Amino acid sequence: FMMRLDENNDLYVLTHNIYGNPAFREALDKPTSVLRVRNGSTDFDPKYYFDLESAASGLGNSVVNFEYYGGGKFMASVQDPSQLDLANPFSYFNDPVYRWYSFDLANQTAERVSDEYTVAVIALSYFNDGMGYMPVQNSSDANIMEEDLST
């Protein structure tokens, strides 16, 4: 769904499960993950598979966005299924049920950078001078979240 080149021109591909929609999640039965195509290759690297859900909050916690900021790291929002309104089939997309994480492609780790729940906004983020600026929307406001990328 989303692809990014790193500094080595390796291509990373985010494969997700339709924003964590419970019906699609069950049908696909695969976690959100990242696959890699090494520079100069046309095939996925069979030795690289990064299960983003397990690294963040556990299986069933879908991941959207792939905002690469350098050094093998990217920001993404992770769904918290406990926040879903099960009576609303579009809660996974319309409600603030996601929190932002920083992911490390080399170490295959994740760290939550925000406790605020946001809607699944997919938009371009901006990174400059060690700071990251990501668009966020909760149930009443839309803002820009600022994060120090060194912490």
Image: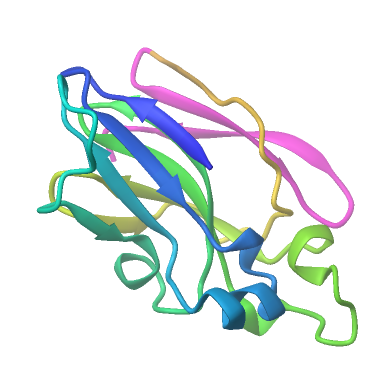
Q: Residue at x 71, y 43 (%)?
A: 121
**Residue closer to the observer: 71 or 138:** 71
**Residue closer to the observer: 146 or 96:** 96
Quick check: 136 left or right of 68? right
Q: Is residue 139 magenta?
A: yes
Quarter of the figure with the C terminus: top left
Q: Residue at x 30, y 66 (%)?
A: 55
Spot occupied by residue 61 in the image (x, y as percentages of width and height): 51, 72
Question: Would you identify the image quadrant in which residue 106 lies?
Answer: top left
Spot occupied by residue 9 in the image (x, y as percentages of width and height): 22, 18
Q: Residue at x 16, y 51 (%)?
A: 48
**Magenta stretch secondary structure, dominant:** strand
**Outermost residue toward the left in this view:** 47
Quick check: 57 left or right of 125? left
Tell me how the rendering is colored.
Answer: rainbow
Spot occupied by residue 86 in the image (x, y as percentages of width and height): 81, 86
Q: Residue at x 38, y 32 (%)?
A: 148
Q: Which residues are magenta?
A: 129-151
